[in-house]
Image (spheres, grey):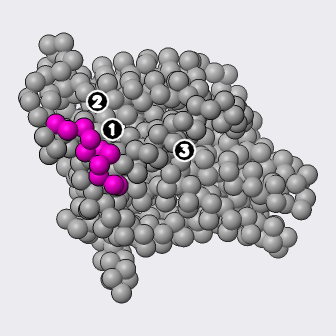
Amino acid sequence: MDLFSNLAMGFNVALTVQNIGFCFIGVLLGTAVGVLPGLGPLATIAMLLPLTYSLEPVTALIMLSGIYYGAQYGGSTTAILVNLPGESSSVVTCIDGHQMARNGRAGSALAIAALGSFFAGTIGTLLVAAFSPYLSRLALSFGPAEYFSLMVLGLIAAVVLASGGLLKAVGMILIGILLGTVGTDVSSGVMRFTFGSLDLVDGFEFVAVAMGLFAFADIIANARGSNTRTLITDTVKGLWPNREEFRLAWPAVLRGTALGSVLGLLPGGGATLSSFASYTIEKKISKHPETFGKGAPAGVAAPESANNAGAQSSFIPMLTLGIPSNGVMAMMIGAMMIHDIVPGPEVMTSNAPLFWGLIASMWIGNLMLVIFNLPMIGIWVRLLRIPYAILYPAILIFSTIGLYSIANSTSAIIMGAAFALFGYLLNRLKCEPAPLLLGFILGPMMEEYLRRAMLLSRGDPAVFVTRPLSAVLLAAAVVLLVTIVSPMVRKKREEVFAED
């Protein structure tokens, strides 16, 4: 009964005119930017984050969540119509989705992606609502030592699941942790690595870091490319799968939803890992694997359901433990901190309307994607025809205005520009910036929990192995680290990410 009463409270919060309106705006803006190839959820949220500064915390998080769902959906649209994934989790959708479009079934492919995503989102929302209270109760028993060990495990898992070389992923996390130390030390009040600059007294501005590494760096990379886009069709007709396509797609939707719901919980997992894994499984268990790559409905249904389920379930560790499982969740934690909300298990008890309102808005946002975006597909097709020479300068101008509005100062713009160049350099070096953002968010938190644990134990480092739960988490981190450095695992990992 508690679950139903909590959900009723959540819908009571989410169904206000203001929250529904901003959820719709988030879904609409997220889809509009997510449709553009090369700008995925991370870049989209980074660009639009300043829009939420003046909003109430629950409204801001509902809007950001809507942006996330919309960007995920927009990525599948470009994957199907243009054969260019809007973001990494839509890479697999290109394989069969675009072939369906070439075979005259673009509308059917888009409908399968939307309906599969809605079903997966519904199941994912129910899982978040059902399991979050239990994890929150468990997390309330965590002390500083357990939280430190959990964050160590999370960062090592992020190394495993980051694309590119292992050393590069480790390097990105370490750089992120070092960047997080810049500014005034909370405990001692000493300024660290500010080099006398007053602009760095409070550390690097989170929005400037995120926007520079993802949004601005992606714009530079895309502006440098060939920017050739070939639409299969100007008009999309038949926005409904036929009976045979339904028969082939629905089992894949169920399997993709189940797999994505589990993989989304893993640190470093989420939408991308879920979509790749589900497509591989569908192809292996299919009675006709030769149809994959030629327009198989299951090849669209499985990854789209899995990536949406993974996107939903990745909220669970973020909301209950305060641990981001991927870059987008790190962005959400950053948004919570901006609105003076401490992420973790106490959110459910100290701010229950926000917690359950956000969960209820997840289902509302996914419903909006189906109801509004399929009829609006013609608008997204026209948006895809706007030349990059016009599109990206306009995005850059509005994003810069958003950066300036943070503190009515040019310092955030300068930071954003510096991190844009750094992000572009990382792209050229084939280094994924998402682990850097995880390190930037978790680094200061790890330092704080490390200090608290050492103070409580009177400087005895054995506290991390004498407390049972902390010892188990550290042991799991060590096992994971030993596993990933083994030659066999490293070779297999490189083969998997070579497809990306």
Regarding mark 1 in the picture, which secondary structure is present there?
helix
Res 210 → quadrant: top left
User: Quick one: label 1 or label 3, which is nearer the N terminus?
Assistant: 3
> Gap between marks 3 and 2, in whole Å?
29 Å
Q: Position of residue 454 (x, y in %)?
A: 18, 39
Residue type at mark 1: give it.
Answer: Ile
Front tag of 3 and 2:
2
Q: Is residue 410 magenta?
A: no
Query: Which residue appears farthest toward the top when viewing the image?
Result: 195
Q: Nearer the viewer, residue 394 or 146?
A: 146
User: Quick one: label 3 or label 2, which is nearer the N terminus?
Assistant: 3
Residue 174 drawn above or below residue 298? above
Proximity of marks 1 and 3: CB atoms separated by less than 8 Å: no
Regarding mark 2 in the picture, which secondary structure is present there?
helix
Q: Is residue 248 left or right of residue 313?
A: right
Residue at x 31% of width, y 35% of height = 443
> Gap between marks 1 and 2, in whole Å?
7 Å
Q: Nearer the viewer, residue 253 or 224?
A: 253
Mark linked to residue 34: 3
Residue at x 27% of width, y 56% of height = 142
Mark linked to residue 180: 2
Proximity of marks 1 and 2: CB atoms separated by less than 8 Å: yes
Q: Position of residue 91 (x, y in %)?
A: 67, 42
Q: Which residues are magenta?
A: 459-469
Label 1 packing within 10 angstroms: few (<14), some (14-19), many (20+): many
Residue holding disc 1: 441
